[in-house]
Amino acid sequence: MAYFLKKTNNKKGTYLQIYESYYDPERKGGAHRSFKPIGYVHELVSGGIDDPISHYQSEVDELNRQHNEKKAADKSKTISDESPEKFLGYFPLKNLNDSLRTKQYIDLMQTATDYRFNVFDMMSALVYSHIVHPCSKSKTYDEVIPKLFESADFSLDQIYTGLEYLGMEYEKVIEIYNHQVNLKYKFDTSHTYFDCTNFYFEIDREDDFRRKGPSKENRHEPLVGLGLLLDANQIPIGMKLYPGNESEKPVMRDVIDSLKTRNNISGRTIQVADKGLNCGNNIMHALKEGDGYIFSRSVKTLSEKEKVWVLLPNDYREIKNSSGDVLYKIKECIDDFEYEIDDEKSGRKRKAVFTEKRVVTFNPTLAKKQLYEINKLIEKAQNLRTSQAKKSEYGECARFVNFVSADKKGKETDGKVKVTLNDEAIENARKLAGYNMLVTSELKMSDQEIYKAYHNLWRIEESFRIMKSELDARPVYLQREETITGHFLICYLAVLLTRLLQFKVLENRFCSEEIFSFIRDFRVAKISDRKYMNLTRNSSLIKELSKKTSLPLTSYFLSSGQIKKMLSHRF
């Protein structure tokens, strides 16, 4: 490419233009095009330029000098400090995030601070970064954010400041998102799914927030508990963090009350949760608030009378698949059942009776799995018994043995401990393998409707799995409570946007693993000033998204204009 001053003579006078020469791939040869129109010589002289031709020839010479310098620099160019590769798979999440129009409200929140960075932009960059490559905040700032296609305008210190601010205001942020999501997609709160989990921290000492308690992963480090509430379509409605030593059962009541109040969730909802949250107080609270419940109940903890009913073959219906194979058997009953309630006034326990429907199922596949696990525990118990292991070594298999102090003749004493297999416990465990019970206030719902409603609870467990594995939510290196809370808010928003993409845009045609693979694999590499190469392998998800958006997601070469269209697309 070179520049020259073109002089065109016509009736009006001599017209000046700066032209550039370039290679035309269609003509396979050199061509010229106008770079800058200047004007007529006599008009330029009237405007105060004594010698327009010499004046603009000097400009042409300078353009050629700059071009030659750039050409020489390109020849001697070394490896760049900046990677030519850019993450682009986050663009559908950015499209959704922008379309919710939450920025205007968070910007208004920020006016009460003196921050010299935009909190919404920082929060969004962390959400996208945490999805494409979860890692520590310092590594995110150094290695991930620079590879997002759009540039970021904040420092690492500002990230920590912003996280602390978001942690203090996380309920407001969730309320803003819920308001905007509800305007666009409408929450379905006829059923709400609730569950809790915890995250451990590799620190020795507890603090007011990270407390030692029962870990889901059998860890002994301090914990932080997290309660998550989903609507009937498995879209997150809210979260609540609590110290790890607190019981999950009262947390459920506090979280649901708080979230329903803050997010204006009115009307009757059916709370769906697993057996860990099934207790008399939660049932009474749901009924008192005008809500319903569907809880799982362990058949091992039932009274002997109820166990007899469960094991009786009477009234079971077989549910089969299209091939005629039995998936499970199911039966139901309605009766009054007694629960133990903690009386808040007296501090004592009292009895309460609730009329509820109980649905019991027998799953042959589950029975086979549980029998295998039971036999493995029995085998382990026998080996430990033979090797005269300590009582503390038995672990879970201790429920299948008896520890009795006995003498050499087998008579019970206060001396040496004798270990025997508990045949009654083994027989009961084997008889109840494959059975599961659901208890509910919904007397008019069919057993099949109750079964299907409860089995959607796996979506909330999947959300926790996404947080723990896909998003690596455990913030080992964060110390302050507000910063830790801000981090979990980032994880929550990542799950929310991913779920909206999965259920509302892609209509649940693709699983979360496929979506995360697309987001992380869809990358481009810069090959010239305005051209990029698509590094992504084709997939059914990319084809579907390309068809839905009319964007060139399957093209090998992408222009900067096409990429900007992706980032500004609206579903």
Image (tube, rainbow, N blue to C red):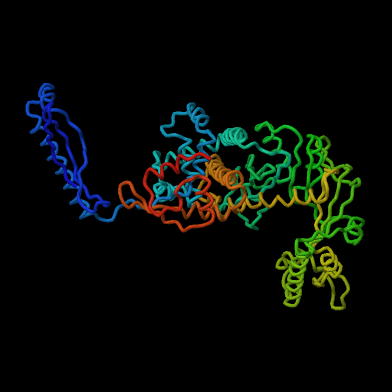
Does 419 appear above or below 239?
Answer: below
Q: Residue at x 54, y 56 (%)?
A: 540
Q: Residue at x 24, y 50 (%)?
A: 24
Occupied quadrant, residue 253: top right
Q: Residue at x 80, y 51 (%)?
A: 448
> Number of numbered discs present?
0
**Which residue is the extreme one toward the top?**
46
Does 122 appear above or below 303?
Answer: above
Image position, residue 534 (x, y; %): 41, 54
Occupied quadrant, residue 533: bottom left
Instruction: Please tell me which residue lies in front, 562 or 258.
Output: 562
**Which residue is the extreme one toward the front?**
11
Image position, residue 21 (x, y; %): 19, 45
Does 36 appear above or below 370?
Answer: above
Q: Is residue 80 left or right of residue 287?
A: left
Image position, residue 64 (x, y; %): 15, 43
Instruction: Please tell me which residue lies in front, 167 or 118.
Output: 118
Does 98 appear above or below 339?
Answer: above
Image position, residue 511 (x, y; %): 60, 54
Is residue 351 visible in the rendered image? The answer is no
Is residue 349 visible in the rendered image? The answer is yes
